[in-house]
Amino acid sequence: MNRDNYKNTNRQQGMSAVEFAMVLPFLIALLITTVEFGRMYYSYQRLDLSITMQAQASMRVF
């Protein structure tokens, strides 16, 4: 490997590291957003189910 190829390889690796560092916060934000929306949807479904079950139970009482 000659000297020019060695410099280009190091430069490519450095550019890749910088690009990764720039994109990483967006990827983490996307992951967190996806997880939070999933949790929100799950909570909504559980709340809806509990309200339905409570309404059914209250109808049996009267």
Image (cartoon, helix red, strand yellow):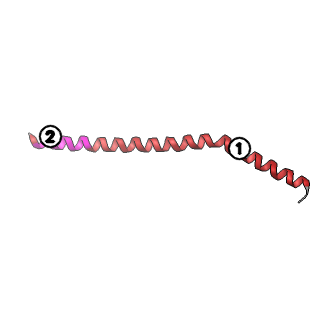
- Vertical position of residue 8 compared to residue 55: above or below: below
Residue 58 image-quadrant placement: top left
Badge 1 density bin: few <14, some 14–19, many ≥20, Cα 10 Å: few
Vertical relation: 2 (above or below) 15:
below
- Please name the residue that numbered disc 2 is placed on: 58
- Secondary structure category for the residue under label 1: helix
Residue positioned most to the left: 62
Q: Is residue 5 left or right of residue 30?
A: right
Q: Quadrant of residue 18?
A: top right
Between circles 1 and 2, the one closer to the viewer is: 1
Q: Is residue 56 left or right of residue 9?
A: left
Nearer to me, 38 or 15: 15
For disc 1, the marked residue is: 19
The magenta stretch spans which residues?
50-60
- x then y, percent, for residue 48: 29, 42
Residue at screen point 16% across, 43% down: 57
